[in-house]
């Protein structure tokens, strides 16, 4: 199916900016022209591509078409040998998926060293970020999947260590006799979202049972640490975010020495290997620094 590149670029602009008005400004068009282009593309494809709202979001088909447009832009930039200067319409865009804890600890320095590319970062659990690659919606991802997604290269990054932590007062209140299954069931915990299984995995390691505590839903890595400091609950916090607190004693481990290690991998689309190699090298350098586990 042949799609008009102008219509595809308009779709991508709507999804990148979140509105028809902003897309019109970016493209130098009227808002009516943007609507007409999108309607022509939707008629051509035969399905709705954008969910109207604040912001506008893409349907699954719309996101795939927009991602394809970004990939084509990268390939054109690669052929031109100068992404920053020669990519049509300005710098190329790369969409990557990464888990929140990596984003909050070690990942951003990798992006900061890459010039000539604009990044769209999708945040998802490391157990699910590979799904974005399978759907073709991102060009690369930090994932816990140790097997390469079809059409992707994979490189190991290292291990992100997690500590089950809480404030000393919280531990004294909820675990006066140690961490037992009944105490775990009663004590409020923190959970990032419905995909977050780190607490459940740690509980099984310690108690040998599947125990479901009451959870505060808190989709923020830094928020997890703050909530633990405030005594709201206990949570699985990445070592780089709590190392100082553990040293100072403002946070303590529920069971000293019992940690949870999550191996991470970098997967990137093989079709864009030459373009993505500099980013992959930067990610691996950042991981060597940020994921190092003290002896």
Image: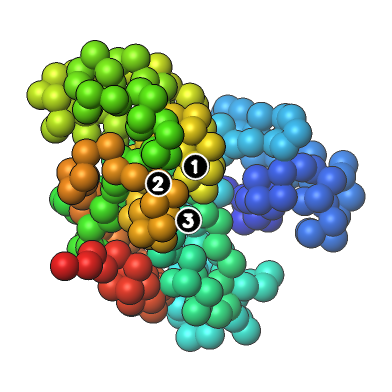
Q: Nearer the viewer, mark 3 or mark 2?
A: 2
Residue holding disc 1: 229
Does residue 178 appear to the left or right of 6 in the view shown? Answer: left
Between 218 and 165, the residue placed more toward the observer is 165
- Report if the CB atoms under discs 1 and 2 are less than 8 Å apart: yes
In percent of the image, x 64 and y 36: which residue is there?
A: 57
- As displayed, is residue 253 above or below residue 245? above
In percent of the image, x 62 and y 73: which residue is there?
A: 91
**x, y percentage for residue 8?**
62, 50
Which of the marked residues, 1 or 3, is nearer the chain's N terminus? Answer: 3
Color scheme of the displayed model: rainbow
Q: Which dot marks residue 251?
A: 2
In percent of the image, x 44 and y 49: which residue is there?
A: 250
Q: CA distance from mark 1 to mark 2?
A: 7 Å
Residue holding disc 3: 104
Say which quarter of the image contains residue 270. Answer: bottom left
**x, y percentage for residue 213?**
34, 18
**x, y percentage for residue 25?**
84, 56
Does residue 98 appear to the left or right of 51 in the view shown? Answer: left
Q: Which dot marks residue 86?
A: none
- As displayed, is residue 56 above or below residue 294? above
């Amino acid at each position: 199916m042949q799609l008009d590149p102008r219509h595809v670029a308009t779709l991508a602009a709507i999804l990148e900016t979140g509105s028809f008005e902003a897309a019109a400004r970016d493209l130098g068009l009227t808002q009516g022209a943007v609507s007409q282009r999108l309607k022509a593309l939707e008629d051509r494809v035969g399905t709705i591509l954008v969910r109207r709202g604040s912001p506008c979001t893409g349907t699954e088909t719309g996101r795939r078409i927009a991602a394809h447009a970004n990939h084509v832009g990268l390939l054109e930039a690669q052929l031109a040998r100068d992404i920053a200067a020669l990519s049509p319409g300005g710098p190329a865009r790369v969409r990557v998926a990464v888990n929140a804890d990596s984003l909050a600890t070690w990942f951003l320095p990798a992006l900061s060293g890459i010039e000539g590319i604009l990044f769209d970062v999708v945040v998802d659990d490391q157990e699910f970020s590979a799904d974005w690659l399978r759907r073709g919606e991102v060009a690369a991802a930090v994932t816990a999947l140790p097997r390469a997604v079809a059409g992707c290269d994979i490189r190991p990054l290292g291990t992100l260590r997690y500590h089950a932590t809480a404030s000393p007062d919280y531990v004294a209140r909820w675990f006066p006799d140690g961490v037992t299954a009944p105490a775990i069931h009663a004590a409020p915990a923190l959970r990032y979202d419905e995909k977050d299984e780190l607490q459940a995995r740690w509980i099984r390691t310690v108690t040998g049972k599947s125990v479901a505590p009451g959870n505060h839903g808190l989709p923020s890595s830094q928020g997890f640490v703050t909530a633990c400091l405030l005594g709201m609950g206990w949570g699985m916090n990445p070592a780089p975010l709590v190392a100082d607190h553990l040293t100072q004693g403002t946070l303590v481990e529920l069971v000293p020495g019992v940690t949870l290690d999550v191996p991470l991998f970098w997967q990137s689309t093989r079709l864009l290997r030459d373009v993505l190699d500099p980013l992959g090298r930067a990610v691996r350098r950042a991981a060597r620094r940020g994921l190092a586990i003290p002896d």
